Each structure stands twice: as structure tokens, then as C-alpha cells.
Amino acid sequence: MNVAELRRTIDLTAAGEEMYGLIAELYPICRSITGDGVRQTLARLARDIELVCHEVPTGTRVFDWTVPREWNIRDAWVKNAQGERVIDFRRSNLHVLQYSTPVRRTVGVDELRQHLHSIPEHPQWIPYRSSYYEDAWGFCIEHERRAQLTDQAYEVCIDSRLEDGSLTYGECAIAGGSDDEFLFSTHTCHPSLCNDNLSGVALAAQLAKQLAPLELRYSYRFLFIPGTIGSITWLSRNAPRLSRIRHGLVVACVGDGGAFRYKRSRCGAEIDRASEHVLRHAGADYEVRDFTPYGYDERQYCSPGFDLPVGSLTRTPNDCFPEYHTSADDLGFITPRNLSESLRCYLEVIDLVESNRRYASTNPKGEPHLGSRGLYRAVGGQPSPERAQMALLWVLNLSDGRHSLLDIAERAQLDFDTVRHAADLLAAHGLLAERE
């Protein structure tokens, strides 16, 4: 089975439910850029896909960065004068500033407020905040509850460890017919946040699971990494293989109900054209953005020293929905249906890239006699026979060994599937020969 056949047979509804179920399992885990939460997450993914986990020691130099100390946390709370937990890590792992240094002491309310983070415009939401590369401690709290902290003193405890350890990332490699690779990268460093980015983790894992048994043209590599430091670390350790990357997508924010957004690569690559073509012919609203050096790990893959053909395909992108980096990005913010629609879109892009070939006409002098070969009858039963017929003519005319099927689809303003079907018919009748 190839990707085109998978698209026709996959139960997207069941896949959406499966992805949502995985997110629900992973949601309670406190993840960060390092630590046991990441390892627990990768161990769960390894039950479904062939995942190799890598440990990179604290202090390892990775280009201009250094792998940080490992952070783990057991518990955290703020108690009032009655000994009640008014802030409780066990209720939500977002309550603690990520990478907080350990602390246990009594502080005055004014000092406590200096270590609190809240969102005045969304008083019922807990913000997600971090302090990865600067020693600090703090708590995140709903703004309406912050106003209720009126005792003169509070007991604070953050039972965390910040010590030499390692950075952990997971890698799933699927061999295809070529050593050329299609790279997928998703970040695993966020705690209980669903759209950003458990949705990306679940979709990437589902893609790896679905692609593993197929006959594939390209090889596929899936990275489950902490944001920024993870991609920089992987790039620093994999210089010999980077020239094999022909296409790449950063997978994030694919569980909400927003329109699809595609962010182009820096270099302008085939993956940009493939993704834009799929969105253009999907029959729904979409947006395409030029590359900017802000966002997710595409900015690392597209840094000038690499300039890899990596774009980003999301629904509502980072920082563009109010729930972003708050407790409102929960299991109610995403749906199985949205996840299944995102999976469908990704599979269409993969299918296009897998099928985008160049052909040369075996009868280039004049138009071949299609009627005598029964080709007009072959397209007559299709939903749009006129489009199918025009696709035959366009493919014959532009199949000169230089134009790909995507080139032809764009020139003819036809969808890729129609053009591919025409090429398959023509090749079956000996009128096309594939070119490298």
C-alpha cells in the first residue's frame, strides 16, 4: 500500500479519536525542556511507534548554546495562615513557573506577589510561564484568585531539583525507497497544554504509525524534541544527514478549529508549493505566510547556516489565539474532528510529495490519437470529465522531462489528483516515460 491508497482507506474518524485519547493520556504529565516528564511522554509514544530516545548530557556545547541542567519537580504549593493550599501544583502543573529553583520558606504577601504571574484580561485562566535560562522561582495563578491572597504571610514550597542530567529527545526513522528524507518535527516541552503542543505530538505519532508499513518513495524522520534547544541540539549532532532532507514540516497547533495556516520555508522549497496547492484546492479558508524568524523550530532549521526546506503547517498558529499558553488550552479546546481534519491535510501533502514525478512524452511530435486508445472513454466516467480531459492534454504537452506533475497542475490550474490520474492513464498506455 502507498500513501494514495492509505488516503482512500484510512478511517479518519477513528484516527481522530485515537489522537485525542493519546492527548488525554499525556495531558497530566508535567513536561519541560528536560526531565522525567519528557521521558514519560516518549515512553508512551514508544508503545505505538519505533522510537529511539537520545540523552545529551548537561553542559554539552551545541553551536552557540549549552545543554542546560535537568529540571524535575515533585510538588509545590503556597499555604495560607490556616495551612490551606491556596496554590497547588497537584491541581494544575501550570501553577509553577517552569524551571523554578527549589524554595521552602515563609514570605510576606508583598514578596509573594513579586513571584506571582497572572492574566488580568482573563482572570479565570492560569498562565504558562518559564524561566529556563535564569535562576528564579515563582507561581502562576488565576488573576481573580490572586486578589484573594490577603494574609500577611504565606508558606511557599517548590520541591524541585535543578542539577546536572541530560536533555532527552525521541527520533522515529522510517526507511523508504530513497535515502532522501521528509522531516517532521514537533515540540514536547510543554506541560498541560493541548493545542500547543500535545496536538502536534499526537498527530506526528499518528503519521509515523500510519506510514511505517507503507511502500514509500522517501524516507521519513520524526523528531519529538524540546523547543529551540532540542532542534539546535539535533542539528548539531546530525550534520552528515542534513543534505538528505528534501522536505520538512514543523507540526504544531493542529487540534483547534481555526483555518489552516502554512508558513513558508526561508529558501522557497517544493514543500511550500505542495502545502499551498493542497490548501488551495481543499475548499476551505486558509492562509499562507512568508517565512519570519519567529515562531517554532522552523526558525532553527531555516537559519542561514542550514537553510533547510522546512515549513510549518498549523491551524491557528502560536500567539494568535487567546488560550495560547494558558490553562484554557485544555482538552475542551481541541476536538477529535479537528485532529482528523489536520491528519487528512498532512496526508494530502505527503501524498503529493510522494507522487510528484517528471515524465517525458514518448510521442512528442503532435498530439497522440487519444480516441483510438480509449482514453476519452476512460475519463468520461469521472465526476468532471471535461477537467479530466484537459488534464490529459496538459500532461501530454508539458511532459518534456523538465516539468513535474505539480508544475503541470499549477500551470493548468487543476488539482494534483486530477493531473496525477491523467499521468497514470497516459503512462499505462505507453505515452509517458518517467524521468529522474
Image (cartoon, helix red, strand yellow):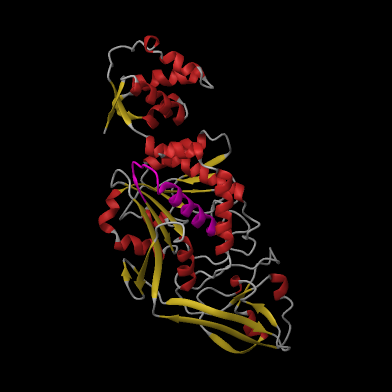
Can residue 64 be spotted in the picture? yes
In the figure, is residue 114 to the left or right of 68?
A: right
Q: Position of residue 228 (x, y in %)?
A: 42, 63
Q: Nearer the viewer, residue 18 or 87?
A: 18
Any magenta on residue 6?
no
Q: Position of residue 127 (x, y in %)?
A: 61, 67
Q: Residue at x 39, y 22 (%)?
A: 425
Q: Nearer the viewer, residue 416 or 210?
A: 210
Residue 75 position by quadrant: bottom right
Residue 358 position by quadrant: top left
Q: Is residue 294 above or below residue 4?
A: below
Any magenta on residue 198?
yes
Q: Nearer the viewer, residue 385 or 298?
A: 385
Q: Nearer the viewer, residue 78 or 338?
A: 338
Over which residues does the magenta segment extend? 197-220
Q: Residue at x 35, y 70 (%)?
A: 56
Residue 52 position by quadrant: bottom left
Q: Position of residue 304 (x, y in %)?
A: 33, 54
Q: Position of residue 262 (x, y in %)?
A: 49, 45
Q: How many marks?
A: 0
Q: Residue at x 37, y 30 (%)?
A: 405
Q: Is residue 35 above or below residue 330?
A: below
In the figure, is residue 254 to the left or right of 247?
A: right
Q: Residue at x 45, y 17 (%)?
A: 378
Q: Is residue 416 above or below residue 340?
A: above
